[in-house]
Image (cartoon, rainbow, N blue to C red):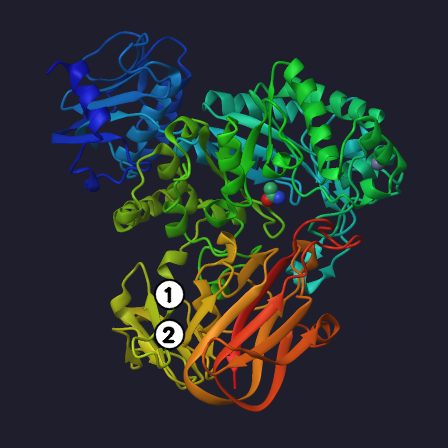
Amino acid sequence: MSRKLLFLFLLLFNLSFAQEQLPLIPQPKSTLVGKGSYTITAKTTIHAAKNSFEANYLKELIKTQTGLDLMITSKNSSNSIQLIVKSPDTTVFNKEYYELISSPNKIVITAFSNQGIFYGIQTLSQLISLQKSSEIQVPCVTIVDQPHYAWRGMHLDCARHFFPKEFIKKYIDYLAMYKMNTFHWHLTDDQGWRIEIKKYPKLTEIGAYRNGSMVGHYSDQKFDNNRYGGFYTQDDIKEIVAYANQRHITVVPEIEMPGHAVAALAAYPQYSCTGGPFEVGKIWGVLDDVFCPKDETFTFLENILSEVIDLFPSKYIHIGGDECPKVRWKACTKCQQRMKTENLKDEHELQSYFIQRIEKFVNAKGRKIIGWDEILEGGLAPNAAVMSWRGTEGGIAAAKEKHYVVMSPGSHCYFDHYQGEPKNEPIAFGGYTPVEKVYSFNPTPKELFADEAQYILGAQANLWTEYIETPSHVEYMIFPRMLALSEVVWGTSNPDKFPDFQNRMIQHFAIFDKKGINYSKSIYQITTKVKPSISGNGILFELKSANNSSGIRYTTDGSSPSLSSNLYSNPIEITKGQTLKAALFENDTQKSATIEQRFYWSNAVGKKITLVHSPHEKYNTGGAFTLVDGIIGNRSKFGRDWLGFSGKDLNATIDLGKSETINKVILCVLESQGSWIYFPKKIEVLLSNDGQNFESVAQLNSSQIKEVKGEVVLEVASKKAQYVKVIATNLGKIQEGNPGAGSEAWLFVDEIGVE
Ligand code: ACM
Ligand code: ZN
């Protein structure tokens, strides 16, 4: 077989021989491990074209990793690492393609572009040990590789918290290490405007600073009054864009409109509906004041976008488009007039008009817009790409309409969610997205036919920073989850082989340690899972650690676990209210934090439960069973314990297995208005003995639910029944004057107790 054919063969058939031994992430398309190794010494040269950025990058990388300072030469030499850019080949042309062949006497990286060479270098860097030494062995391999998806993105919110230029460069370096190619830079929001615009200096003089921030979780409603802010000058931005460009990363700026605009309106209130005055947002969530779609506002935004487009060479400009409350528009004569003259039937069509008008401007400048999936509402702009975040449905709908899509659903791609047991984690937005969940993501939904699937550009993870104040915390949230995403978008992930991925991933922790990167070791903590017991009597509590589950010890009497406590082997059966504590021990020392789980007990725990409506995929970690698992949802860290319904009711039926005397039914509901989570309108309990005919026995209205702060007890007065139905009626469309007005409310519920 000719060499060219061999490569084609390797690429097409995704061959991988013995590659498990190499801790490469993302896993290359094909890897053949040969015999022996190449030795890099001080005499090794880097052979590349003159002034090659990549050659210098490789030189620096080898110097940092090993201490060896190699010479770069444009002359061929026998003992060298060669970087060869060859002219496009018709059989396999992809500018991100590369081959890496290391043999006993040389290493050759070949590609069709400097970008391909750059990826070859990243792979080589993972093959080179981190040990300082005068002789470095590189195993003999033949790697043929190229990515599946064109958009391999990471987002960073610099509005809620500001991160200095130096850290943005580090962030870009982190993306480069894992062959990510798109940095989505969220630069403007209610709580801060972070990009210098020459024509409108007040955007940063006023809009870049706020006089206080939230302390703790949104649900605590606490604030400080410290002035907070910062912004990037246009020179900073040019420097960052150039830095990213050298590393083959496209920076896509996001300038939010028409919502998330309060920082801009604090500086220029004339572009709002009411005229203000406004102050830069101190509270997280979604604020009601948004840009007013009058002509002056479009001139303002177009002038801003002109400067943005001059600074960022990206094909796409992100214009936001998400979470735009319509209350101001409904009350504004200018908005209502605009709807009349443009023949728009409602405010959603007005939002669509807004986005389409901005799209025309951006297209005229030779660029395209991308926006969050709300831009589908009221009609999608003709050339717009969609970033699907509320789920994958928006992305599916857009692809079916032949629009390009970047998948970024909250369920798998929101890195502001918890990655480990929420109790052990720093405070986060909510949700539960451990690395295994990220690794299981498939950016191309099954619902799409092949001709539609081609519109899926790729996927990206989003890092919103309400609860992330420092660079080191940013690192903690993206590492190691970004490694899982990098393999997903490279197209070589296999959820069935998560243990293999995890094994490779753990080997990268040494790289992070060496580079001083902060990362989450949550996989080593004890993670827990509650399951129905087989007997139907109680529940099973499963404990796990990526480290070594065989060293877990636990207590059930409230005492701290120690080396003499029970050794965990199989899931623990829980049949009464109790507190369980556990920790991992190895070589006589405690290796994990102690976890503590209190189990609540009622007749409902572990019983069969069915739901009429499914919870939203984002907040459905344990399914219906979550409601009878004996664990009461944590109200400030609403990660995995809660089920979230978007616009839908909770309608649950529990089968107690036999007729029981019931005195009361308990339900926990949550409210966090800034996150559009509202108490239900009504909670009703119905009982039945045959599972068919239900009798309504108790109900509470919304003011009664508010009074008890969501810890709802419905008195039933000693009735006998086998089946208990609990209906919590979703608030539905959020009323005017409240956060999220006009959108569907979220209903968050947990544990149903039957006592
Ligand atoms: C978003 O998370 N609001 C796009
Ligand atoms: Zn208006």
**Is 24 located above or below residue 664 in the figure?**
above
Q: Residue 320 in the image: x percent, y percent?
A: 64, 35
**Residue type, mark 2 in image:** Ala
Q: Residue furthest front?
A: 693
Which quadrant of the render holds ligand 2?
top right
Q: Secondary structure at mark 1?
A: loop
Tell me the distance, in whole angstroms, between the alpha carbons under discs 2 and 1.
8 Å
In the displayed structure image, the side of residue 389 where residue 569 appears, left or right? left
Q: Earlier in the sequence, mark 2 or mark 1?
A: 1
Q: Is residue 229 visible?
A: no
Q: Residue 181 in the image: x percent, y percent?
A: 45, 28
| Mark 1 crowd level (few <14, some 14–19, many ≥20, 10 Å Cα) | many
Q: Name the residue at 61% across, 49% down.
A: 469
Q: Residue 384 in the image: x percent, y percent?
A: 59, 26
State the quadrant of the N terminus.
top left
Q: Which residue is mark 1?
A: 526
- Mark 2 Cβ inside 8 Å of ligand 1: no
**Residue type, mark 1 in image:** Ile
In the displayed structure image, the side of residue 422 where residue 324 appears, left or right? right
**Is 44 located above or below residue 666 in the figure?**
above
Q: Residue 641 in the image: x percent, y percent?
A: 50, 66
The quadrant in which residue 157 appears is top right
**Is 421 located above or below residue 505 in the figure?**
below
Mark 2 and mark 1 in contact? Answer it, CB < 8 Å. Answer: yes
Query: Is 29 in front, or is 71?
Result: 29
The quadrant in which residue 110 appears is top left
State the count of labels. Answer: 2
Q: Name the residue at 63% across, 50% down.
A: 466
Q: Name the residue at 40% across, 51% down.
A: 437
Label annotation for residue 582: 2
